[in-house]
Amino acid sequence: METTNLTIKEWALDDRPREKLLSKGVLSLSDAELLAILIGSGSRNETAVALSQRILFSVQNNLQELGKLSIEQLVSSFVGVGEAKAITIIAAMELGRRRKLSESLQRPIIKSSKEAFNYISPFLSDLPHEEFWIVLLNNANKVLSHHKIGQGGITSTLADVRLIARKALENNAVSVVLAHNHPSGNLQASNADLSITTQIKKALKLFDITILDHLIVAGNAFLSFADKNLFLD
């Protein structure tokens, strides 16, 4: 049955997102149907599901990209999305991010670049600007704490070497994982990335603190300085 021009109440029961969730479970719903439940209604000319499909299509059906949209972008780009619906979408994306963070806060042991990425990615993966973070570890590679060191624009960020050293000493860290994101999706290490890594490495070496890795995060992908042998003496 063609449902695009019908209101949700006119759909067959099995096609209605809320009823489908109740009868078949949440896993039976598409991303568009879940988003439709959040926004509640569409417009005069399209259903909530059709509107949700249009929103998702604009970000190539990528929830990471959806999480980067601002309230202003949602309202201005999609007829049928007002401030209230945009706020609901933003809030849902933030809850998903915080759920990932709560899993990260279990203070795991980090022994590989993949484990480091799994820990730090919730902080960096869907940001529209660059940020620089550090993860501090003890002598058993167990996470002690994590800290945002700097925030920049779309193409660059600042990392204060003195602040990194201070945080490491305050937490009695034995080693550090550095991480920053590239919102552009580029996973290449720039000359600036290499230079700041060398500066931090030399500074921390004075206190017998080791840099285990430096990660560049771009969405769900990452580059590891350790894996690629990019550390400079």
Image (cartoon, rainbow, N blue to C red):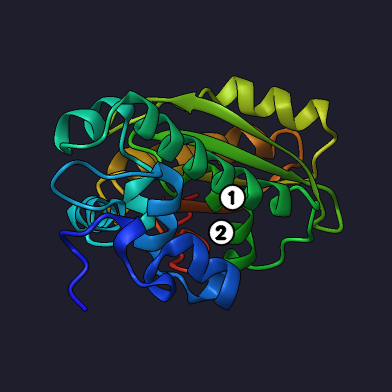
Mark 1 secondary-structure assignment: helix
Position in image of residue 66 (x %, y %): 33, 48
Q: Is residue 221 left or right of residue 175?
A: left
Decide which of 213, 76 is in the foreground and name it.
76
Write the residue at 64% across / 65% down.
115
Decide which of 63, 109 is in the foreground and name it.
63
Position in image of residue 56 (x %, y %): 26, 56
Q: Amino acid at mark 1?
A: Ile
Q: Residues within 10 Å of mark 2 (few under 14, many from 20)?
A: many
Mark 2 secondary-structure assignment: helix
The residue carrying mark 1 is 120
Q: Quadrant of residue 128?
A: top left
Decide which of 208, 223 is in the foreground and name it.
223
Q: Is residue 103 left or right of residue 130?
A: right
Residue 230 appears in the rendering: yes
Tell me the number on the disc at residue 117: 2
Decide which of 41, 73 is in the foreground and name it.
41
Q: Residues within 10 Å of mark 1 (few under 14, many from 20)?
A: many
**Cα separation between marks 2 and 1:** 5 Å
Q: Amino acid at mark 2?
A: Phe
Position in image of residue 98 (x %, y %): 62, 43
Write the residue at 72% across / 61% down.
110
Tell me the number on the disc at residue 111: none
Residue 62 appears in the rendering: no
Dots 2 and 1: beta carbons under 8 Å? yes
Q: Is residue 59 above or below residue 128?
A: below
Q: Is residue 59 left or right of residue 41?
A: left
